[in-house]
Structure formats: structure tokens, C-alpha cells
Image (tube, helix red, strand yellow):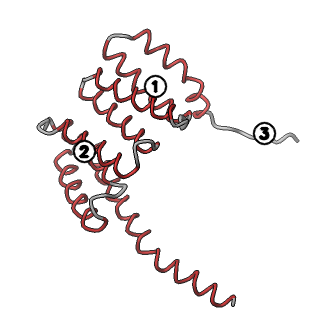
Amino acid sequence: MKFIRHLTLLLLILAAYPALSQNKKIDKSLRKVDSYYAQGNFPKASSALIKLRKSIVAKMGQKNTYVPGLYIREARINLASGLLKQFDQTLNDALLSSSSIFGDNSTSYASTLIDVAAIYNEYGNYRISREYSDRARDLLIKTNQLTDVLKARIALVEAEAMTGQGFCNEAIELLRSIESYYAGRAVEKETIVDG
């Protein structure tokens, strides 16, 4: 009996291993795209993203958890490259795919809303950015999923939008409300041995 259990467990692990290694390859490719973006090599980042999208869609289909992030990266790379032809459409596609994959009431969808708001800040459309960050906050409050991490992300995006709109004092007040959260994360804890 134990032998059968061990054999079944081994077979499950062997069956799941290709999927796990495939995700590692995808994550490595995503890091490569992000690296090209960070270096300012936008043509390479764009071509690597297109190649990665084709392979992901071929292997996993159009509806998978990577698609919203691919749309977000595409919009960010195109914005940095100055290619604004389908900028709004790409962000709408990210929201639609996130909504259909994760659902309208999930933290993943709210996180996509926050990412879209951050990209609109980079674009300079602060009013729309604040609308998306408000939608994210309202969704998280309504579903009772507002964590300190998400609250801090929303506050940073909103503060940037407020600064862009000229509401600097209100932005500082908002940042002060989350200052203790970030200060607590930045502290390294030491243990001192009495002796």
C-alpha cells in the first residue's frame, strides 16, 4: 500500500515538473524583457515581448495569467518608445483580460487597475490615473481585501497623480499616512545576545 502511494506521488511530481519548468522559462524571459526596458533598450524589449507573447499564447492559450502583465509591459514599452498609436487600447485589453481571467472582484484585477493607473501617471494623464486608483480602492474595500501592501501601492500612485495635478500638500499628507508602513518594511531587525 505504501509503495502505491509513493509511486503515485512520484508520478504526480514527474507530471507537474514540465509545467513548473515551463513557468520558470517564462519568468526568466519576463525578467529579460524587464531588463531590456530598464536599460533603455526599447526595441529589444519590444521584440522580446512579442516573441514571448507568441510562445505563451501557443503553449497556454489566450486566457492565462500572464496575458494582463504582457499587455501592461507592452503599453509601458510603447509609451517609453513614443509609440502611442494603440496605447489606450492596450491598457483596455489588459483590464479586459484581467477581468475575464481573475474576475471583477479579485485582488489581481485590482492590482492590474493600479498598474494601469501608474502607466497613466507616466503618460501624464493624472485625472484618469486617479480614476483607476479610486476604482481599485473601491473594489478592494467593497470585497474587504484591502491589505496594507495594496493600500500603500494605491497611495503612492495617487500621490504621484496629485503632485502632477499640483496638489502637493495633499500628496504629502497622503504619503505621511503610509509612511509608517514603509518605514517598518525598511528596518532590518537585529538580535542582540546578552552575555
Q: Which residue is mark 2?
A: 93
Which marked residue is nearer to the observer: mark 1 or mark 2? 2
The answer to which image quadrant residue 92 occupies is top left
- In this picture, residue 181 sits left or right of residue 101: right
Q: Which residue is mark 3?
A: 192
Query: Which residue is found at the position 31% from the left and 42% from the top?
Result: 95
Name the residue type under label 2: Asp
Name the residue type under label 1: Ala
Q: Residue furthest left?
A: 85
Viewer-proximal residue among 24 and 94: 94
Q: Which residue is mark 1?
A: 155
Query: Which residue is found at the position 41% from the left and 40% from the top?
Result: 111
Name the residue type under label 3: Ile
Q: Badge 1: how crowded within 10 Å, few (<14), some, or many (20+)?
A: many
Quadrant (top left, top right, bottom left, bottom right) of the C terminus = top right
Quadrant (top left, top right, bottom left, bottom right) of the N terminus = bottom right
User: Dots 3 and 2: beta carbons under 8 Å?
Assistant: no
Q: Secondary structure at mark 2?
A: helix
